[in-house]
Every structure is written in C-alpha cells, then in structure tokens.
Amino acid sequence: MRDSAVKDRILDTASRLFYDQGYHATGINQIIEEADIARASLYNHFTSKTELLLAYLDRTHEDWFLELDRYLAALPTPKEKLFALFDHRIQRQRKLKYKGCHFNKITAETCEDEEVFRRVKMHKERFRQTIRDLVGQTDHRRMMDDETLADTLFLLLEGGISVGAMYRSSEYAEKARTIAAMLL
Amino acid sequence: MRDSAVKDRILDTASRLFYDQGYHATGINQIIEEADIARASLYNHFTSKTELLLAYLDRTHEDWFLELDRYLAALPTPKEKLFALFDHRIQRQRKLKYKGCHFNKITAETCEDEEVFRRVKMHKERFRQTIRDLVGQTDHRRMMDDETLADTLFLLLEGGISVGAMYRSSEYAEKARTIAAMLL
DNA sequence: GCTAAACTAGACAGACGTGTCTATTTTGCA
DNA sequence: TGCAAAATAGACACGTCTGTCTAGTTTAGC
C-alpha cells in the first residue's frame, strides 16, 4: 500500500464528515467506522484530531483552487472568468446542499487556533486576489476603481454564499451574480 | 426569586459560551459551573440542551432588533439609518471580537434541525426587510431599483461580517460601508 | 522467501457528554 | 408562621470522547 490508500480514505471520510455535520460533532470513532480502517492506522497517519483538521483544510484549499482553475481555463475573457467565479460557486453549493463555505464553517466552530486561522485567512485572501487580478484585466464600466470593484465582487459573492447557507438556497448567490453584472 | 434570576443566569451564561466557543464545544457541565447554579435547576427551566439553544436563538433575535431599533431611533433620515446599519454591526463586531454573526455561526454547526433553521431564516429575513423598507424611503441615485439595491446592501453587509470573522477584522465591513455609500 | 513496514482488531484509561434522581435547604407569598 | 415552589449538592446511569497500547496479520520490496 504505497502512497497509502488508507490515508486517503481517512482524509476523505473525515473531510466529508467535518463538512456535513461539523468538526466537533464528528468523532474519531465515526471516522474509523465509516472509513473502515483501524484506529491505530488513523493515529499512525495523523497524530491527533487537530492534525486531521489541518490536513482537511490544506487539501480542501488545494482542491478548491484546482477545481476553480479547471473551470476558468475553458473561458476566453477575464470578464467571463469573473462571472464564472459566481457560476462555479453556485453550482458547487447546489452540489453541497447549501451548507456554505468550508472555511467559514470551520471559523464558526474553532476559536483561538492560530493554525486554523492562518489557513482560512490565506484561502480567502488568495480568492480575493484572484478576483483582483481578473478585474485588473477587465474592461468594466469604471463605476469604481479596480480595487473597490474587486472588493465589491468579493463581498457580494461571500455574502451570497453565507446567506445561501442560512436560507439553504442559491437565491442570493444568484442575485449577487446579477448585481455583479450591473457593475462590470 | 420571582421571574427567576436563575433562569436568566443560565441563559446568559449559555449564550456567552455558545457564541464564544461554539454550541457543540460547550457542555452542560461548563454552563452550570459558570452560571453557578445547580444541575437540576437547568433541567427545571430547560428540558434539554436543544431547548436551551432555541431559547438562546430567540433571545438573541429579540435583543438584536431591540438594540438596532434603539440605535436607529436617534437618526432623522432613512439614508442615515441605512448607514447606521453598517455602523452598528461594525461596532458590535468590534465588541464581539469579530466572531461573526450569531445565526451564521449556529447554521455552521447544526445540520438538519428545522427549529434552528426556521429561526435563523426568520432573523435574516427580517433584517433584509428592514433594509428594504429603508431603501424604499430613501432618495438614492437610482443606479438600480429599490429591490436590487436592498439586496446589494444586504449582501455587502452580510459578506462584510462573514469575511470579518475569517479575517478577525472590521476591514471588509468598513469597505462594504464605503461601497454602499457609492450606491446610495 | 525473508524482513520491515503497514495494517488489523480490540482492550483500555480517563475524561467528559447528557439527562435523571434523591434528599435537603432556601425562598417567596398568603 | 407555615407551606409550596424553587433552588441546592451531588450521586448515578450510560454513553461517547480522544488517545495509547498490545498482539497478531497482511503487504511490499529486496
């Protein structure tokens, strides 16, 4: 079992459970049960539940941008890519049953863990920067400067996802997209 | 002890802990310890931890709008009131150490509890309606129709608070206010 | 085929979770 | 002042939590 399939199965299962039912509501016992692995295997690959959480955040972050890049790659113009940011997350939320942003969820559950905080902030900052770069390459209506427009799009989208989790709906994320279209 | 001070102390303590460290991370034992009340007293006033959670949401909702109404009452124009929505929540988040919206936090922790969901949605919907009403009374630049403007302000503010929790900062809520000023 | 690493099952420790119960004391009011 | 309601302390049941450990089995690579 080189590049252990076991480790992947642990992380897959933990990720699913952490997101679906929450970090604190998920116990090690449930993870080993559903991943169908031995208790010692888990503690062989991860020294603690906290390490597992950090691995979950790291992998989610990587996958998240890989998926996004793949989605954007097909599109020719920066403006289309900007719209695609909305579309991609709307589709994603639909698939995830509107449980909201992974990083927002973890922030809501964990307090005072600097390692968690660092990862969450880095993830969001990179996303914001992605928007900022695309805005810089876009011919927009110049209703506001590039920086402000990027912030606006970022806030609309984050707001849409956050509200979407509370409404269990993509309604507001779609409204955010419509509003973005008026500004671009 | 009429209108039991004990019950208040329970709810005060539970509310503080639910918000500060999370619902699942807070145990009954810690609540009775910090509230300095007997175990049986808690279960006399609340049948279960879930009931305590619902009471927490109900009271938070009521207090939230009472506080907001008091804040808005002093202001003469609807436009000033709209800005005050931002100011009020920014100040509040500063006081709460940027842990974000109570209802957003609970949504992130609890899945599939319809009673929780109902309360969260009702709270947000009422807030959105508050914005909508104020927009209807405001002479704004007509860059968009009233409904869309209200949605925009709602999304900007919710986004600002949500991002603020992940950045532990009021930076983006303040940016949201600045953007709102450009649209109003 | 041998060896070491990886995986397995499962017992265990010790803390903590929620909720119930008893028995006693305090409190508020008529 | 007397009595019912409300509060107290704390034991208890029973489950779950994280993390450790032992001992046996499977697997991969030389």
Image (spheres, coloured by chain):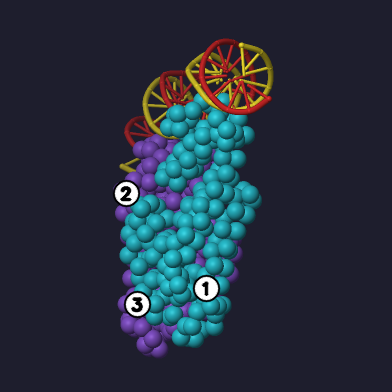
Chain colours: A cyan, B purple, C yellow, D red
Mark number for residue B167? Answer: none
Q: Amino acid at mark 3?
A: Thr
**Which residue position holds label 1?**
A134
In the rendered image, the vertical position of residue B174 relative to residue A29, given as above or below:
below
**Label 2 amino acid?**
Glu
Question: Which residue is rendered at x = 48% and y = 52% of the image?
Answer: A102
Please rate how many residues cluster around mark 3, counting C-alpha atoms within 10 Å: few if below 14, some from 14 to 19, many from 20: some
Q: Chain of mark 1?
A: A
Question: Could you tell whether A150 is left or right of A175 in the image?
Answer: right
Q: Secondary structure at mark 2?
A: helix
Q: Is residue A43 above or below residue A151?
A: above
Residue position for label 2: B115
Residue A20 rendering spot, x and y as whole percentages:
41, 45
Q: Amino acid at mark 1?
A: Leu
Q: Is residue D7 above or below residue B89?
A: above
Q: Identify the image quadrant of residue A34.
A: top left
Viewer-nearest of labels 1 and 2? Answer: 1
